[in-house]
Amino acid sequence: MSGIEIVGVILGAVPLIISAMEHYEDTKKALGTFHKIRRAHRKDLGKLKNCQLKFKLNMKELLLPLLVDDTVTRVEYEQLLVNPGGSGWREEHVDDALVHRLGDCHERYIEILQDLEETMMSLCKATKVEDAQFQDLLTSQDVSS
C-alpha cells in the first residue's frame, strides 16, 4: 500500500470515527439517563415498600389489643389485617372497639386513612394500575416467567 492510499484510508476513517464517537456520546447520555431513572425508581419503590410495611405494622398495633381482650377472634383478626377497610371493619363490635381504643383520635385516624386511600387511588391512576392493557401485559409476563 502506498503512502497516498494509507492517507486516503485514514482520511476516510476519520468521519466514520467521528460519527461513531457522536453516536457513542448520544448512547452514553441515554444510558446515563436510564441509570438515573432506574436509581430513582429503586429509591421510590423502596419508599413505597417502607410505607406498606409501616401500614401493616400500624394495623397490627391497632388490632392486636382487640385480639388479646377477645373482642375479635384470631380468624377475624387475620381477615381485618388482610382486608383493611373491608366489611369486617364495619362490624359493630369491631367499630365500637376501635372507637373505644382510639378515643378522641378516632375521627382523625379515619380522616388520615381516607387521605391515604385518595393518595393510593391517585398513584394507581398515575401508574395505570387500572388500565386493562397494562393488566393484560402483566398477566402475559407472569405466564411467560
Image (cartoon, rainbow, N blue to C red):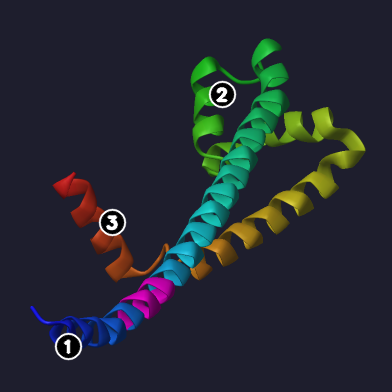
Residue at label 2?
A: 77
- Helix, strand or loop under label 1: helix
Mark 2 vs 3: CB contact within 8 A: no
Q: Which residues are magenta?
A: 19-26
**Amino acid bearing label 1:** Ile
Residue at label 3?
A: 138
Q: Main secondary structure of the magenta part?
A: helix
Q: Nearer the viewer, mark 2 or mark 3?
A: 3
Residue under the image location 52 percent in, 69 percent down: 126
Give the numbered dot on residue 4.
1
Residue under the image location 19 percent in, 88 percent down: 8
Q: Earlier in the sequence, mark 2 or mark 3?
A: 2
Q: Is residue 24 visible?
A: yes
Q: Is residue 90 visible?
A: no
Residue under the image location 62 percent in, 38 percent down: 50
**Amino acid bearing label 2:** Tyr
Q: Earlier in the sequence, mark 2 or mark 1?
A: 1
